[in-house]
Image (tube, rainbow, N blue to C red):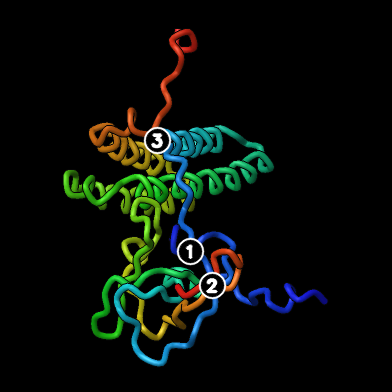
């Protein structure tokens, strides 16, 4: 046994933080929510039991991802100064995260639509807070055309 | 917690003999995930809890996110770094 093995700590503690890449966009949550919406549509249009079972599994997975992306926006992107300026953002994120849980357990298209609207409201605040320029990398002009 | 602590530092943590004081770096349980241990600086002690903050507010996940930490969840105080040797010394 080497001396370093003896000296090596037995316990690991985290002193570091998130390593924020700095890219945040409600669109990421919206795409997952759109998936939920379309999956619910396809579920109701289908008579194939196997397809329906798969649709449920995938919808639950996408709803969980939408929740994750909302949580990341809330805990990592929005800073105290944003909350001061746009106090509604706390409740918007909180309710949208809860709505994700609803969509996860539901096959009502209305629940998925409500989630999309909630994410759009978060998107409005994100835009007002300067999100598009603060966090996204602009596309080259040629790529936009 | 840079530059006070860096990723991979080996540190000695002493059991708490007294309540932590502002400015000290403590080992505590993350209130969100108790099995996750964190090292953060004490920003305030009030009643039975303390506020823990990272040294880099922009990037830190600390009491601003997980709230005050009960003193019963503060396990010890980081006192000494013994590796890497070049940076060994009191914390």
- Give the residue pinned by disc 3: A25
Question: Looking at the picture, how far across and down is residue A69, in whole percent?
Answer: 44, 45
- Give the residue pinned by disc 2: B81
Q: Nearer the viewer, residue A16 or A38?
A: A16
Q: Which residue is drawn at the image coordinates 59% and 34% (left, top)?
A: A46
- Choose the circle earlier in sequence order: 1 or 2: 1
Do residues under tags 1 and 2 come within 8 Å of each other at their CB atoms? yes
Query: Marks 3 and 1: which is nearer the front?
Result: 1
As measured in the structure, the alpha-carbon distance from the residue carrying label 1 to the one carrying label 2 is 9 Å
Whether residue B53 is visible, yes or no, is yes
Q: How many marks?
A: 3
Question: Looking at the picture, how far across and down is residue B23, in whole percent?
Answer: 32, 73
Q: Nearer the viewer, residue A112 or A3?
A: A3
Q: Which residue is drawn at the image coordinates 49% and 46% (left, top)?
A: A63
Single out the residue that lies furthest toward the left: A85
Q: Nearer the viewer, residue A115 or A145?
A: A145
- Give the residue pinned by disc 1: B5
The image quarter containing residue B53 is bottom left
Question: Looking at the picture, how far across and down is residue A37, in whole percent?
Answer: 46, 36
Q: Which residue is drawn at the image coordinates 69% and 42% (left, top)?
A: A50
């Amino acid at each position: 046994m080497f001396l370093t093995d003896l000296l090596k700590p037995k316990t690991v503690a985290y002193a570091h933080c998130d390593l924020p890449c700095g890219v945040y966009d409600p669109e990421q949550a919206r795409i997952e929510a759109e998936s939920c919406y379309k999956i619910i549509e396809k579920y109701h249009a289908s008579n194939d039991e196997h397809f329906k079972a798969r649709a449920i599994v995938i919808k639950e997975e996408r709803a969980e991802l939408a929740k994750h992306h909302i949580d990341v926006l809330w805990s990592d992107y929005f800073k105290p100064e944003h909350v001061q300026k746009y106090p509604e953002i706390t409740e918007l994120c909180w309710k949208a995260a809860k709505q994700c849980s609803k969509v996860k357990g539901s096959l009502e298209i209305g629940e998925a639509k409500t989630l999309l609207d909630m994410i759009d409201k978060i998107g409005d605040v994100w835009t007002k807070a300067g999100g598009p320029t603060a966090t996204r990398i602009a596309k080259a002009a040629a790529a936009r055309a | 917690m840079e530059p006070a602590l860096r990723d991979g530092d080996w540190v000695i943590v002493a059991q708490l003999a007294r309540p932590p004081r502002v400015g000290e770096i403590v080992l505590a349980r993350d209130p969100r995930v108790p099995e996750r241990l964190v090292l953060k600086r004490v920003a305030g002690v009030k009643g039975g809890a303390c506020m823990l903050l990272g040294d880099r507010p922009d990037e830190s996940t600390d009491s601003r996110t997980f709230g005050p930490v009960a003193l019963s969840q503060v396990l010890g105080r980081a006192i000494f770094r013994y590796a890497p040797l070049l940076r060994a010394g009191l914390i």
